[in-house]
Image (cartoon, rainbow, N blue to C red):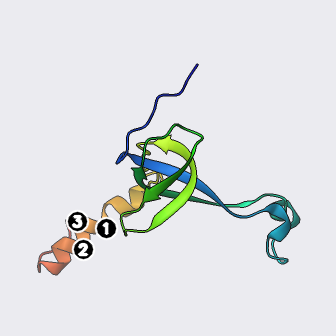
Amino acid sequence: MANNPVAPGTWVQIRIQILPPGQRAPQVPPDTAQVPLIMLAKGFLVGEAEIGDTVRIKTLSGRILEGELVQVLPRYSHDFGQAVPELLSIGPRVRALLEGGKEQ
């Protein structure tokens, strides 16, 4: 089964190995020292490629980086965790106080 080619200019994510396991800093824990230091970067693909290819990207800041193409149209998956009920009432209470009213 062949991969689908990814068109130039597509937003992608690449993987770059910064340091191999044997070159990690001496103060890192032993289990950390056994794995490479990896950087993930997002940018616009320069040239056509397929997942797994070594590619170049142009980041939003204009830098050109080279690495392994790992994802097409990567999503942002970070969040702020579960809602904390105790914190939900703070915004409205502060707004009321700043507006010179009383807390409700």
Query: Which amino acid type corresponds to the residue marked 1 in the rendered image?
Result: Ile
Which quarter shows the N terminus?
Answer: top right
Label disc, if present, on residue 92 of the rendered structure: 3
Q: Amino acid at mark 3?
A: Pro
Q: Secondary structure at mark 3?
A: helix
Q: Residue furthest top?
A: 1
**Disc 3 crowd, CA 10 A, few/some/many (<14, 14-19, 20+):** few
Q: CA distance from mark 1 to mark 3?
A: 6 Å
Work out how far the residue at label 1 is from the one at label 2, CA to CA, in angstroms.
6 Å
* Label 1 SS: helix
Residue under the image location 34 percent in, 48 percent down? 9
Labels 2 & 3 near each other (Cβ < 8 A): yes
Residue for badge 1: 90
Above or below 70: residue 32: below
Image quadrant of residue 17?
A: bottom right
Tell me what residue is drawn at x 44 percent, y 54 percent: 79
Q: Residue 3, image x and y in percent?
A: 53, 28
Residue located at (49% from left, 50% from top): 13
Hey, what amino acid is under mark 2?
Answer: Val
Residues at discs 1 and 2 in contact (Cβ within 8 Å)? yes
**Disc number at residue 32?**
none
Disc number for residue 94: 2
Q: Is residue 96 above or below residue 41?
A: below
Q: Which element type, helix, strand or loop, lies under badge 2?
A: helix
Q: Is residue 94 above or below residue 1?
A: below
